[in-house]
Every structure is written in structure tokens, then in C-alpha cells.
Amino acid sequence: MNNPSYLDAVKRLNEHSIPYEVLHTGDDSLLLVIQHGGRILGPFASRQSSGMLWMNRAWASPDDWNTLMKDGYWNLGGERLWIAPELQYHVEERTKPSETYRLPASIDPGDYLLTRVDAHTAQLSADVVLKANNFKDGTQHLSVRRTVRAIPNPLRTLHTCSELMNGIDYFGYSHTVDLSMAKSSPIPSETWVIMQVPQEGTAIIPAKNNCQIGWYYRPDEKNLINSYPSAITAKMTNGHLFKIGFHAASWMGRSAYVRQLDDKRWSLMIRSNFSNPSSYYLEEPFTSPGETGYAFHLYNSAKSEERFGEIESQGLSIGGLSGKTHSTDEMATWYFCGDTQRLRSIAHVLLSVHTDDLQKLWP
């Protein structure tokens, strides 16, 4: 099933008087930044196109969208910001994570203010009040400022740019999150930026075979996650639940997701952000108390009606042992669309994954 289109999204937003901003991200593509839930939708190659990020199919139906909004359902799709650790803010009792999971309304949909900064930039801001569980007790008061901006092609100054980009479309944006608290707090917090991607693609993580992985949900099939000399891959296939974390000491800050668009064209998405193993990455696998340090996660939904995977980037910690009251995390996202041979060359340049490995993992 195809993703809803840009026009579908704009119709639903206008019908419900939800504020939004449109950014142009390269090669005439469009990015939607919406106030409700603080979502980033797209990029859309045209007004008639579906987005590169997954969107709930309710966007294509006025009746389904009305029901979704009435029920207050969080899963709109696109890219979103939540606040971690999940076990501290989202789970009331660690030993019963599924039964006591409660998404705080101050995180999603939140109470965002959306403003236009300039022709290429939009900003979302909100104050967040959260109750802490499991790790610490108490109430946390945070301020969030998010800046979404169109960014240029990262290959543009290479001598080989013209050759690499021959027949390739590009669009890209950055998502910068400023997280702060008024005064130091024993309760730790960190940003948690989550991209929802359509399934039937493959995530590529530049990492060695001995990279430490944290298992949240183990896949029920052995061939979904594979190791190569210069990368680990995960197939986002419908019907197979998994979630894994990559330790900051081994994960170098870039990841990719490749997916076939039609008979001739593929998309290569590359996400880049700073990974600092000296920071306190606080997420823990549900059954492994004290096992921390995971700066990057992959999640795959098993629900047949919600065919999405998630690419999740953790931010730098504030509060707690960090002693900090402010963090800034910037995630850059680059999309390239075209034939597989040229996209493999681009992946080799930006990911430093061996060409032999790329040939094996990506037909």
C-alpha cells in the first residue's frame, strides 16, 4: 500500500485548521512541519507524491482521520521527538512494560508553537512536564526548541560530485533539538528523535562485527539481522517484531535505509548525527537493568495494518550524572533517489561501507 500523498496531508491539516509550514528541500521536493504532535512529514518529490517517511494511511481518508484525531491516536507517522529514557517517562512499572506503558500527553501531541524563521527554516517550541518512574522519582520540567531546515547536498564540493549525482535526485533537511531545564536536576533526560520509514527496505549500520548490540525485542527469524565486515544490516519486513540498540562506542553516527521505489528507482536515506561515547546514553533494554550506552536504535513493527520501521537517534543527556542543564543535538537527513549502481557509490562515500559488502547486502 502506498503512503498518502502531500495533497492528502494538506487537505487533512486544512480541514482541521492545524498549522503547518512547507519547506523546499532540493530538486523541488517538499517537507511539511506540522504543529500537532510536532511532526515532520515527507520529503515529497511533488504534490502528488507520497512521502519518503511512513505516514498513517488515515491521512488519505477524511473519515479515518476524524476517528484518529477523536481518539487522540499518536501514530501519525513522519519524524517525531519523544523524551527518553523510555523506562523513566513512558513505563510506570519496569517489570510490566507492556501493561503499564503510558505515553505522556506533554510529549505527544505536546503543546507546540510553530513559527516560520525564514524561507528555509521552521521552528517548534514547547514546555514539557513529566513524571519520573523507575530510575528516579519526581517531576521534571523541560523546555524544547526544535529547528527544521533545508540543507544542501553533502556531496556538492567533491570533485566527483557530478559523476556521483548523474541521474540522481537529492533532498535533505536537518532537525536540531535544544533541550533544557531551568536548574540542575537529579532526574536525567535526553532527546529521542524517531523516523518512521515504510517497510520492505533494509537498514545499513556502518559497524564492525563485534559491535555491542542491546536486544529489546529479538527477531523471530535469524536472517533479518546480518553482519558483514564493515556493516550490520536489518531487514524491515512486515510481521516481524524487533528492536535493537547500537552502543555509542561502536556506532559512528551515520546510518542508512534503502528501499525500492519502482522497477528502476531506489531511495537511499542517510541519517547523520553526533555520537559521543563519553555522554550518558540512558536507554536500557527492558530486561537488562543498568545496561546503558546505546546511542542508536532500530525498531520494526509487526502489525499488519501499520507497515513501518523506526530509525531512532538518542541525544546527549542532561540532568543526572551529566551535571548539564542544556543539550543541542543536530540530525542531518540526506535522500538520494535513482539507480542502484550510483546509489551504492554514494553509500560507499558517505558511509565508508566496503563496496563488496554493499554489493552483497543490496542487490
Image: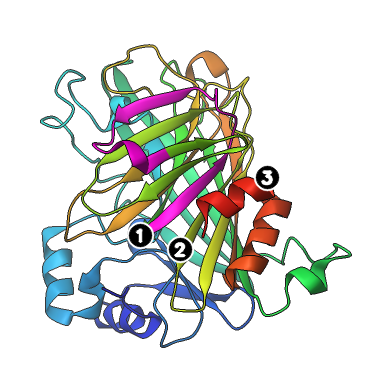
Residue type at mark 1 is Glu
For mark 3, give the secondary structure. loop
The residue positioned 22% from the left and 28% from the top of the image is 91
Crowdedness of circle 1 by 10 Å Cα count: few (<14), some, many (20+)?
some
Crowdedness of circle 3 by 10 Å Cα count: few (<14), some, many (20+)?
some
**Which sits in the foreground, 38 or 342?**
342
Position of the N terminus, as image quadrant, is: bottom left
Q: Which residue is mark 3?
A: 354
Q: CA distance from mark 3 to mark 1?
A: 23 Å
Q: CA distance from mark 2 to mark 1?
A: 7 Å
Residue type at mark 2 is Arg
Q: Which residue is mark 1?
A: 200
Q: Nearer the viewer, mark 3 or mark 2?
A: 3
For mark 1, give the secondary structure. loop
Residue 110: image location, x then y, percent: 32, 51
The earlier-in-sequence mark between 3 and 1 is 1
| Residue 9 part of the magenta segment | no
**Which sits in the foreground, 121 or 91?**
91
On screen, residue 82 versus residue 167, left or right, reads left
On screen, residue 357 versus residue 181, left or right, reads right
- Give above or below for 220 relative to 38: above
The part of the chain drawn in magenta is 198-225
Residue 232 seen anywhere in this rendered image of the structure: yes
The residue positioned 73% from the left and 77% from the top of the image is 166
For mark 2, give the secondary structure. strand
Mark on residue 259? 2
Residue 137: image location, x then y, percent: 29, 16
- Give above or below for 156 relative to 293: below
The earlier-in-sequence mark between 2 and 1 is 1
